[in-house]
Image (cartoon, grey):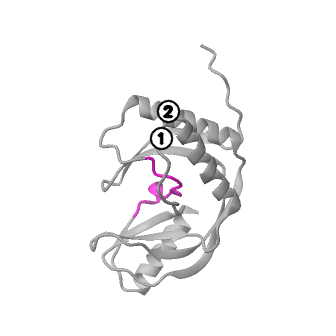
Amino acid sequence: IAEQIQKIGCRLNRLHFVAGNLRPVSHLHVTLLPLADYPELEDEAVRRAMRGCEAVAALSQTFELEFNRMVCWRGNRARIPLVLTQERRSLPLDALYQNTVIQLHRQGFALPKKRFTPHVTTSYNRRSFPAEIVPAMRWRAEELVLIHSFVGLTKYVELGRWRLGEPVMPDSA
């Protein structure tokens, strides 16, 4: 599905004569909730985030996702994000978002100041174009992944991965 998403972004960029910097297929993911912009990660913050994500995954079930709208978001003039998002909100995704907010707040993270829009960033462009409905991209959300993104460097480090709906096993130590 990641290759199909990238192809749609590439096709729209060509259609609108926009030369964009495509995101690598290996980096495409649905951003659900950014925690914070840490220049360096603190071990304790990572442990708390991992505990929160573990709880979220245990309390959540897998579900179908459908994204069908490409939008250029505001950015600086040299980096306008082209994102794939939803025309209509998804109740299971909204529930996952709310559960994530609650569990991370329980771990001491601040609540988001505004509602975040789940999306997949396909490229960064030098100019924008009008939003378009595109063929629906559908897939099953089965995992929650905690990623440390080095903003602006196209570098991600996976900190943890949890299957949705799997119970938390107590530490045996």
The residue tagged 2 is 48
Task: Answer whether residue 94 is magenta in the image.
Answer: no
> Identity of the amino acid at label 2?
Arg
Q: Main secondary structure of the magenta part?
A: loop
Quarter holding the C terminus is top right
**Residue 119 appears at what percent x and percent y?**
52, 63
Task: Answer whether residue 31 is magenta in the image.
Answer: yes
- Disc assigned to residue 150: none
Residue depicted at 30% across the width and 76% down the height: 126
Q: Does the CB distance between marks 2 and 1 fall below 8 Å?
A: yes
Of the residues tagged 2 and 1, which is closer to the observer? 1
Residue depicted at 49% across the width and 68% down the height: 6
> Identity of the amino acid at label 1?
Phe
Helix, strand or loop under label 2: helix
Q: Between residues 145 and 49, which one lies in front from this camera angle?
A: 49
Residue depicted at 56% across the width and 33% down the height: 51
Question: Visible in this render: residue 70?
Answer: yes
Q: Quick check: 168 above or below 92?
A: above
Question: Visible in this render: residue 161?
Answer: no
Q: Residues within 10 Å of mark 1 (few under 14, many from 20)?
A: some
Could you tell which of marks 2 and 1 lies nearer the N-terminus? 2
**Residue 15 appears at what percent x and percent y?**
43, 86
- What residue range appears in magenta? 23-35
Residue depicted at 45% across the width and 64% down the height: 121
Work out how far the residue at label 2 is from the one at label 1, CA to CA, in angstroms: 9 Å
**Residue 155 appears at what percent x and percent y?**
36, 50
Quarter holding the N terminus is bottom right
Q: Quick check: 125 above or below 169?
A: below
**Residue 21 appears at what percent x and percent y?**
34, 68
The residue tagged 1 is 109
Q: Quick check: 51 above or below 126?
A: above
Helix, strand or loop under label 1: loop
